[in-house]
Amino acid sequence: MNRSRVGYSVTGAALAILFLFPLLWSGWASVRTGSGFGLENYDRLFTSDNGVRPQHVFNSLVVSVLTVGGTLFVATLGGYAFGRFKFPGRDVLFLVTLAILMVPYATILIALYVLLGWIGLEDSLIGLSLVLVMFQLPFSIFMMRNSFEAVPRELEESAQMDGCATLGTLLRIMLPAVKPGLITVGLFAFLTSWSEFFAPLILLNSTDKFTTTLAVVNMRTASHGSIDYAALEAGVVFMAVPCLILFAFMQRSYVRGFTSGAIKG
C-alpha cells in the first residue's frame, strides 16, 4: 500500500470517527442511568405525561410518506422535462428553480403559514408536507435532470420507434434507468422530512398533530424546570434509527445517484 492510499485511509477513518462520535455519544448517554446502564430513559421517553406517543410517530410517518411521494412525482416530471425537452426559457426556468436554494427557508415560513391559511391547510399534516416538498424540489429536480441526461438517448429513441408514447417511454424505459437517482431523491426527502423541526414548529399548532421531533423537544423539561438530557438522548437515538436502517440498505444506490449527478452537473 503506497503512502497516498495510507493517507486517504487515515483521513477517511478520522472523518468517520468525527461524524460518528455524536451519534455514538447519544447512544451511550441514552442507556446510561444513575445505577449503570438500562432502558429507563427510553421508558421515560414514551411513558411520561409529555413524552412521545404513537400518534406522534404516525404523524411523522404520514408527513415523510407524503413528502417523499410528492417530491418524487414533481421532481421526476420536472427533471424529465428539463433533461429531455427543449422549450423556450428552459435554461432560465431551471436557473430560477436552483436559485431557490439561496433563499433561507426560515425567512418565508410565516408567509407560507398565511398562504396555507388562505387555502384551508393551516395546522395540517398535508400543508406541512406541501411546504417540505417545495423545499426539496430545487435539489431534487437538479438530481433528476442530471440522471435523465445520463441515460443514452438511443434507449428513448428505440422505445419511440416501437410505438411508445412519451408517458410510456418515461414509465417503461426511463424510470428503471434512473433508479439510483430516484432512490437518492426519495431517501434525501425522507431524511429531511423525518428530522425536520423548524417547519413543524411554525406550521403546526395542535399537539395531536405534532411530529416526533416536536414531541421530543416538548418533553425536554422535567421537574422543577430541569432538562431531562437522558430522555432527550433516547429521543435522538429513536429518531436516528429509521434513517440509519434506510441508509444502510440503500447506500449503494444513494452514492451512485450522487455520483451520476456530480458527473453530469
Image: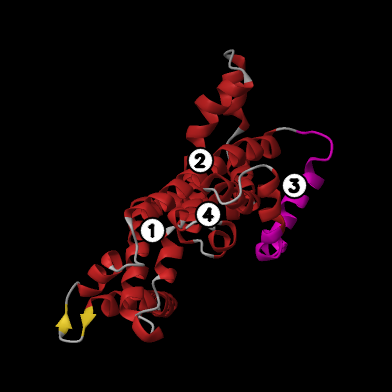
C-alpha span from label 1 to label 4 = 18 Å
Q: Mark 3 points at which residue?
A: 94
Q: Mark 2 points at which residue?
A: 69
C-alpha span from label 1 to label 2 = 17 Å
Whether label 1 touches label 3, CB < 8 Å? no
Three-letter amino acid code at the position of disc 4: Phe
Residue 203 position, x and y percent, is 59, 57
Query: Which of the two residues, 92 or 100, is positioned nearer the viewer here?
Result: 100
The type of colouring in the image is secondary structure
Residue 52 position, x and y percent, is 34, 62
Query: Which of the two residues, 216 or 82, is positioned nearer the viewer here?
Result: 216
Residue 229 position, x and y percent, is 35, 80
Whether label 1 touches label 2, CB < 8 Å? no
Q: Name the residue under label 1.
A: 243
Query: Which of the two residues, 228 or 152, is positioned nearer the viewer here?
Result: 228
Q: Is residue 51 left or right of residue 210?
A: left
Q: How crowded is mark 3: few (under 14 residues within 10 Å), some or many (20 or more)?
A: some
State the count of labels: 4
Q: Quadrant of the N terminus?
A: bottom left
Mark seen at residue 258: 4
C-alpha span from label 3 to label 2 = 22 Å
